[in-house]
Image (spheres, rainbow, N blue to C red):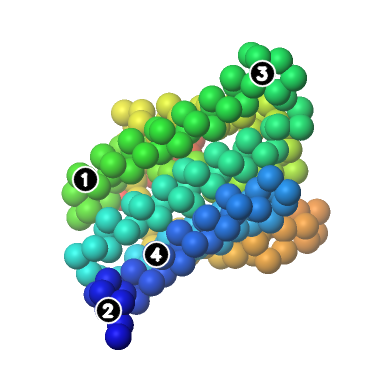
Amino acid sequence: MQPRFLGQLGLADAVTVLNAAVGSLAAAVAITEPALAARLVLLAAIADGLDGVVARARGSTPVGDHLDSLADVASFAVAPAVFVFAVARPALGGSTPETVVLVGVPALFVAMAVVRLGFYMLEDRDVARTEGVQTTLAATILAVAYLAGVTDPLVLLGATAAFTYLMVAPITYPELYARDALVLGGLQALAVLFPAAVDRVFPRSLLVFAVGYLVFAPVLYWREV
């Protein structure tokens, strides 16, 4: 007998569930293998982009949008928060103020990511823009920065703290054109497969691409909406 819910899922939903599974795995390994966790966060981001492609090609189901936001909580809220905690823990936690920062910043990141994803569910999906930094972008920057060699705990915690505001900030971000999303996905795949190749060229290129979009997209990246 087929399980009740699985028979109602489409192919795009299966990719979304894979995103959640990969993100959960990233959180599970972050304490002992932060570099692997960072690569898994990027892999989850690839799955997050792929489920939309599959949905447009093969159709979606009524539960698809809900699954997408739930998966994003695992992959782009909890996983990067645990990852940053894992990277910063060896350097911080020696005093009460340090412990508060070490635990509080990742916790606030998860909280604001959940708020952002909740309100994202209310946005018009036919409009090619969104309010606040996307959780996927925030998680991608945190993960790829580490793979690119940015391993200073204070820098990663500072970036995480900044994203707790930027994810809910009144800043409009245009969605990527398909061609640019393809470039992003390609760089993500190369960074996952070859993170140390040619002096970390792939994660560093992805970091430049992602930070460029973060900083300049609200004012310079124009598209019809």
| 220 to the left or right of 199 | left
Q: Which residue is mark 2?
A: 7
Few, some or many residues within 10 Å of mark 3 (<14, 14–19, 20+): some
Q: Which residue is mark 1?
A: 123
Inspect the image, locate mark 1, and give the three-letter code of the amino acid beneath it. Answer: Glu
Inspect the image, locate mark 3, and give the three-letter code of the amino acid beneath it. Answer: Glu
Residue 224, horizontal then vertical, whole percent: 25, 51
On the question of residue 209 being in view, the answer is no
On residue 16, the disc is 4
Identify the residue at the far front of this view. 1
Query: Which mark is in front, 4 or 3?
Result: 3
Residue 127, horizontal then vertical, whole percent: 22, 50
Inspect the image, locate mark 2, and give the three-letter code of the amino acid beneath it. Answer: Gly
Work out whether 41 lies above or below 155: below
Query: Which mark is in front, 1 or 2?
Result: 2
Residue 202, horizontal then vertical, whole percent: 68, 57
Q: Tell me the residue at 55%/44% (across/down).
A: 80
Say what secondary structure mark 1 lies in. loop
**Distance CA(mark 1)–CA(mark 2):** 28 Å
Q: Tell me the residue at 35%/65% (across/down).
A: 52
Identify the image quadrant of residue 187: bottom right
Q: Tell me the residue at 64%/14% (across/down).
A: 97
Inspect the image, locate mark 4, and give the three-letter code of the amino acid beneath it. Answer: Thr
Query: Which mark is in front, 4 or 1?
Result: 4
| 111 to the left or right of 94 | left
On residue 98, the disc is 3
Identify the image quadrant of residue 200: bottom right
Work out whether 152 lies above or below 191: above
